[in-house]
């Protein structure tokens, strides 16, 4: 199994509804938020019938985690209906609550559909850039990321093309988990980029506080995907990011939103 798939493959824990997510490493570093998004979703998915794919996920980041340690997940069955299921997932390390998530699953139903866009260019013409800054916990040799920032309209827009370059089983739930993992990387960064700053420059205290995904259609992680993000507002040391995850066919597969800390650093005492 590849490094990426191993990281996202939670195993049963010691009690009912408990799961254990592997450590991403390196030791001594703060755990990547996408790890909690993906492993929380993977744990919740293990408790729901495959006929009900994930539709929404909302996760709150309460404390930072240790990248060198495994994560314990407790899944609570909030609701099980004929067409809908809901789960709460709490992530802990050494008994300390790190994140809490709510995840909803629903059986597909017939209805009106829209959400197709014209893709802005071809990712194959772009250089392989990686994410917007260092990501030591991510197996970047297995994920092709190519980024373009655009201010031509007067608004800052970040376009992050990505695809997994290792074989991925034909499992819709797994592809959704991978999307939750990849899309989190530096997603709050555009709230700083609007003002000419960046998370990588460490000019501000920054980090995600809330993350949400609404899945509209199945994601294919082994094909090109475009995460197009912008920041509509920021105030009180926090910024909001909204984004669309668009498949290679131009169909919007998911809508995303994040809130993150972008506070000025306090000056060091003289």
Image (cartoon, helix red, strand yellow):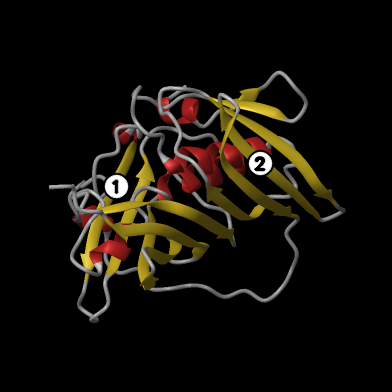
| 24 versus 153 height, above or below | above
Q: In the rendered image, is residue 143 in sight?
A: yes
Give the percent coordinates (x, y) of residue 186.
33, 51
Foreground tag (1 vs 2): 2
Direction right: furthest residue: 82
Describe residue 175's horizontal placement relative to residue 43 as left or right. Answer: left
Q: How many marks?
A: 2
Q: CA distance from mark 1 to mark 2?
A: 29 Å
Q: Closer to the N terminus: mark 1 or mark 2?
A: 2
Give the percent coordinates (x, y) of residue 35.
47, 37
Disc 2 crowd, CA 10 A, few/some/many (<14, 14-19, 20+): many
Seen at 61% across and 45% down, the residue is 100
Which residue is tagged 1? 145
Describe residue 247's horizontal placement relative to residue 110 as left or right. Answer: left
Residues at marks 1 and 2 touching, judged by CB atoms closer than 8 Å: no
Towards the viewer: 132 or 259: 259
* Mark sitting on residue 73: none
Describe residue 225's horizontal placement relative to residue 156 as left or right. Answer: right
Direction top: furthest residue: 14
Towards the viewer: 214 or 53: 214
Mark 2 residue element: strand
Towards the viewer: 261 or 167: 261
Seen at 49% across and 65% down, the residue is 252
Seen at 37% across and 71% down, the residue is 235
Seen at 82% across and 50% down, the residue is 79
Mark 1 residue element: strand
Which residue is tagged 2? 89
The image quadrant of residue 155 is bottom left
Give the percent coordinates (x, y) of residue 162.
35, 49
| 220 versus 242 height, above or below | above
Describe residue 72's horizontal placement relative to residue 126 as left or right. Answer: right
């Amino acid at each position: 199994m590849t490094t990426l798939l191993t990281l996202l493959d939670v195993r049963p824990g010691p009690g009912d509804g408990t799961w254990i997510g592997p450590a991403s490493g390196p030791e001594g570093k703060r755990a990547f938020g996408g790890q909690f998004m993906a492993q929380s979703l993977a744990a919740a998915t293990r408790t729901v019938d495959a006929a009900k794919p994930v539709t929404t996920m909302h996760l709150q980041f309460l404390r930072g985690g240790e990248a060198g340690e495994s994560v314990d997940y407790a899944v609570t069955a909030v609701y099980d209906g004929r067409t809908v299921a809901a789960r709460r997932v709490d992530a802990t390390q050494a008994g300390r609550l790190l994140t809490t998530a709510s995840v909803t699953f629903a059986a597909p139903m017939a209805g009106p559909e829209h959400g197709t866009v014209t893709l802005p260019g071809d990712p194959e013409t772009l250089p392989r850039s990686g994410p917007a800054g260092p990501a030591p916990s991510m197996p970047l040799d297995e994920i092709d990321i190519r980024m373009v920032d655009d201010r031509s309209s007067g608004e800052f827009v970040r376009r992050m093309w990505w695809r997994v370059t290792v074989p991925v089983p034909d499992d819709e739930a797994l592809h959704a988990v991978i999307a939750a993992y990849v899309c989190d990387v530096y997603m709050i960064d555009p709230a700083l980029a609007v003002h000419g700053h960046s998370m990588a420059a460490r000019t501000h205290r920054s980090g995600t506080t809330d993350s949400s995904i609404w899945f509209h259609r199945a994601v294919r992680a082994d094909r090109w995907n475009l995460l197009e993000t912008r920041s509509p507002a920021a105030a009180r040391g926090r910024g909001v990011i909204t984004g669309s995850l668009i498949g290679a066919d131009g169909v919007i597969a998911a809508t995303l939103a994040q809130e993150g800390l972008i506070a000025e650093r306090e000056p060091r005492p003289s």
